[in-house]
Image: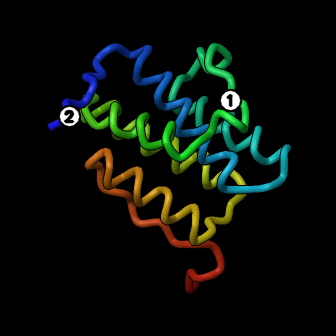
Amino acid sequence: SRRRPAVHRPEQVKAYGRDVLSCLAYWGTFDLLDQDQAFRIGIEKLIPKRADAYPILAYEDCTVARFGAALDALGSASAAARKQIVEACIACVAADRKTSPKEAECLQAIADALDCPLPPIVPAGTGRP
């Protein structure tokens, strides 16, 4: 069986986290400004003070294969790092204050891959007062 690449260094977590957040930002919304904003919100949560060192990937680099490889690698990161990735992903998706079914599905896939439970997220418009 294939061994996972071990991810222990903070730089690796940041780089793979940037890959995941870039994919989420592009796949979650179609407005260019929103994509950039969503990515920035996520990366700031993941890498406070150093976010500029990890710019969003080019759209054509955001493939399902790259997304999967990043999640696979991050699966071996520390529990704290995995939790931080999930929180950054939630911040990214929540940037426009609405969560589409596709975004919710993506978040669930990330949480499952990282073995990190998702906090309950109520999709916009379904919450009762």
Residues at marks 2 and 1 touching, judged by CB atoms closer than 8 Å: no
| For marks 2 and 1 on the same chain, the one whose residue lies earlier in the sequence | 2
In the drawing, does residue 70 fall left or right of residue 59? left
Report the quarter where the C terminus lies.
bottom right
* Residue in the image at 28% along x and 29% along y: 77
Is 27 positioned to the left or the right of 9 in the image?
right
Question: Would residue 78 be found to the left or right of residue 45 on screen?
Answer: left
Q: Amino acid at mark 1?
A: Ile
Q: Quadrant of residue 28?
A: bottom right
Residue 52 on image: x %, y %: 68, 17
- The residue at 63%/68% (across/down) is 100
| 118 to the left or right of 49 | left
Q: Residues within 10 Å of mark 1 (few under 14, many from 20)?
A: many
Judging by the rendered image, the residue that carries numbered circle 1 is: 56
Total of numbered circles in the picture? 2
Q: Which residue is mark 2?
A: 2
Indicate the position of residue 83 as horizontal and vertical percent values.
35, 40
Residue furthest toward the left? 1
Identify the residue at horizontal 84%, vertical 45% (top origin). 32
- Secondary structure of residue under mark 2: loop
In the displayed structure, would residue 37 be above or below residue 101? Answer: above
Q: Amino acid at mark 2?
A: Arg
> CA gap, disc 2 to disc 1?
29 Å
Look at the picture and state if 51 lies above or below 57: above
Colour setting: rainbow
Instruction: List the single residue furthest toward the front.
Output: 1
Q: Is residue 77 above or below residue 68?
A: above
Q: Quadrant of the N terminus?
A: top left
- Residue name at image x 32 percent, y 49 percent: 113
